[in-house]
Amino acid sequence: AAPSGAETSSPANPIKNVVVYGSGLMGSGIVQVAAQHQYQVTMVDLGADHLKKGQGYIEASLKRVARKKFADSDAQQKAFVEDTLSRIQLSTDPEAAATTADLIVEAIVENINTKRSLFSSLDQVAPKHAIFTSNTSSLPISELASATKRQDRFAGLHFFNPVPQMKLVEVVSTAEVNPTVINDLTQFCLSLKKAPVNCKDTPGFIVNRLLVPYLMEAVRLVERGEATPKDVDTAMKLGAGYPMGPFELLDYIGLDTCKFILDGWYKEGKGLAGDKLVRPSERLNELVAKGDLGRKSGKGFYSY
Ligand code: CAA
Ligand code: NAD
């Protein structure tokens, strides 16, 4: 089969080297998919222990993909995994990693100050042509972009969890971004065999604006004592055809990430601040305070 992604992109494709910040659930998935499609990728995190966890996610997921792709050949599975891994470099030096980037994808913790501070320092060292993107679930892209002097080359690139499986990417435009950047990002998504949609820079873009209030309604229903998480999950899977129930999905996303989204919107989400749709939840707060963050920590609404 013809190679996909970077190698078959037109000569005009300005993206070859991708640098991803964050090696958690999302960062590791984005790194994997880009490497699978022939891009050279650097995965950056705070320390070797974080990177190791991210590498573990990638290896487990790649083996899953390989088993499907080359069901009849162990040798081909092994070669596919090794070949993909050979395009991934690891780094704990954010600025050094940025110096060769054509595309930066930020997937670190959902905190506006942490993200702004990272972008501001990367802006000093990344090549002028490099496109900056954030995978934020809920924060305004324009506020992240304003930490840099390249607002015209800054957009949202919102992937979905699990990245290797979910087809959608929301490509988010601000008022300042150059349309050619949106076009380059759209082509990048297509080269990853993803389905891009265009979104405006509004809280939650499309999916999370609808999904997060639904998830929180499920938590409130349980908080009111009207049903158990298990019964709500069964109901939504069997009665509404969702692949996961809301509590399974909350655990899958990560309860800390859900809390960051909710608290941020309640405080200052455009058109959402103070809205009861996004008011804090005691149950969610308690679990996060205990460190029960969902699947990634082994326990959330359920134990894993
Ligand atoms: N890596 C690679 N492949 C994976 C994978 C991973 N991490 N996880 C699942 N898959 C693949 C499996 O290999 C399998 O592939 P085939 O169907 O081709 O054989 C397929 O996904 C289904 O997996 P399973 O059979 O193991 O399990 P499942 O049928 O329960 O599906 C699921 C798992 C894809 C996660 C499914 O339950 C699902 O779609 N859940 C909802 C996920 C969702 O809503 N994500 C969005 C979260 S919100 C978000 O991301 C935005 C935000 O900002 C918070
Ligand atoms: P996660 O907790 O799994 O991983 C975050 C990673 O970022 C950790 O490994 C952490 O060490 C690292 N990190 C923190 N600060 C850093 C810094 N300054 N430099 C480099 N690395 C740093 O989180 P996640 O679920 O992967 O979420 C990451 C981003 O993606 C968030 O903005 C989140 O809102 C968004 N997102 C999450 C989901 C989801 O379902 N979990 C889906 C779409 C988008």
Image (tube, rainbow, N blue to C red):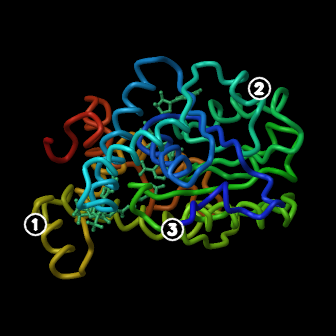
Alpha-carbon neighbours of circle 1 within 10 Å: few (<14), some, or many (≥20)?
few
Q: Quadrant of the C terminus?
A: top left
Instruction: Report ligand 1 position as a quadrant.
Output: bottom left
Does mark 1's beta carbon lie closer than 8 Å to ligand 1?
no
**171 or 278, which is in the foreground?**
171
Q: Earlier in the sequence, mark 2 or mark 1?
A: 2
Q: Secondary structure at mark 3?
A: strand
Is 185 situated left or right of 227 in this image? Answer: right
Please tell me whether mark 2 sits on a helix, a strand or a loop. helix
Q: Amino acid at mark 2?
A: Ser
Alpha carbons under labels 2 and 3: distance apart: 30 Å
Indicate the position of residue 155 as horizontal and vertical percent values. Answer: 73, 55
Q: Position of residue 182 (x, y in %)?
A: 77, 64
Numbered label attached to residue 168: 3
* Earlier-in-chain disc, 2 versus 3: 2
Tag in front: 2 or 3: 3
Q: Tell me: is circle 2 under 8 Å from ligand 2.
A: no
Q: Give the residue number, with chain letter if any, for mark 1.
A: 231
Identify which residue, 150 or 208, lies in the foreground: 150
Q: Position of residue 138 (x, y in %)?
A: 56, 53
Specify which label sits upstream in the sequence, 3 or 1: 3
The answer to which quarter of the image holds residue 192 is bottom right
For disc 2, the marked residue is: 121
Residue type, numbered disc 1: Asp
Which of 61 and 274 lies nearest the eye of the viewer?
Answer: 61
Single out the mark in the foreground, 2 or 1. 2
